[in-house]
Image (cartoon, helix red, strand yellow):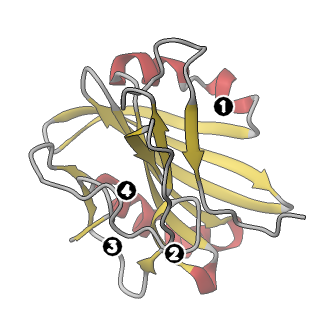
Amino acid sequence: RQTVPGTRVSLEVPDGWTTMSGSAFAGFAKEDLGASLIVNLIPAPFAMFVKRMTPETLLTKGVEVLDEEEVEVAGRQSVLLHCAQTAQGVEAFKWILIFGDETRSIMVMGTFPKPLRDDLSEVVKAAVLSARWDVEKKVDPLEGLDYSVDPPESMKFAGRMGNAITYTKDGDMPVTDPADPLFVVSPGDGVVQ
């Protein structure tokens, strides 16, 4: 079992998978196979967030829901989605687990190329369903980031989503006043010109 850096979430990571670095996402990858396990922390109540994750909404993002079921993971009500998506010309399948509480949601997403479905689907599904959330664990939210930042003095750390970090005037997310500043830092996966 490995903790996703900077989070309170741990997974049973398959052999040969490594911690992702230099990416906007927090999790693990099997780069030679084009497969990944990503954990996103969403500052939205589980009940509200999961209602937004409808097949219709996901389809607008190019994600087709093949199956959806309610599951219990480590005593938590959760939703498991099996999806298909074509992105950048690559056909892939996804297992997405969503759980959380009254203030935040956790989304664990395992993705693998379509040609490897027979080899990876059950492995990735098992890893996704192995997710555990230790809400009491003390965590350095900047752990595992391969960059550093000196935010403006007027800004306070507000949270992390994947490997992106946010700062707000009062350190709260979401920002309560649309006029308040929001400072977001995220590594890029490409070259900026």
Mark 3, secondary structure of its residue = loop
Of labels 4 and 2, earlier in sequence is: 2
Quarter of the image for the C terminus: give it: bottom right
| Image point (72%, 31%), residue name | 59
Instruction: Using a 10 Å C-alpha cutoff, classify the residue at mark 1 as few (fewer than 14 neighbours), some (14 to 19) or many (20 or more).
Output: some
Mark 1 — residue?
58
Of labels 3 and 1, earlier in sequence is: 3
Answer whether residue 107 is visible to the viewer in this image.
no
Answer whether residue 79 is visible to the viewer in this image.
yes
Quarter of the image for the N terminus: give it: bottom left
Type of residue at label 3?
Answer: Val
Of labels 1 and 4, earlier in sequence is: 1
Type of residue at label 1?
Answer: Leu
Mark 4, secondary structure of its residue = helix
| Image point (46%, 32%), residue name | 168
Mark 4 — residue?
128
Of labels 3 and 2, earlier in sequence is: 3
Q: Is residue 19 above or below residue 37?
A: below
Q: Which mark is residue 13?
A: 3
Type of residue at label 2?
Answer: Ser
Instruction: Using a 10 Å C-alpha cutoff, classify the residue at mark 3 as few (fewer than 14 neighbours), some (14 to 19) or many (20 or more).
Output: many
Report which quarter residue 74 is drawn in: top left
- Give the x, y percent position of residue 142: 36, 60
Q: Which one is nearer the viewer's eye here, 13 or 119?
A: 13
- Give the x, y percent position of residue 180: 55, 20
| Image point (46%, 13%), residue name | 176
Of labels 4 and 3, earlier in sequence is: 3
**On the picture, is 74 further left or further right than 166?**
left
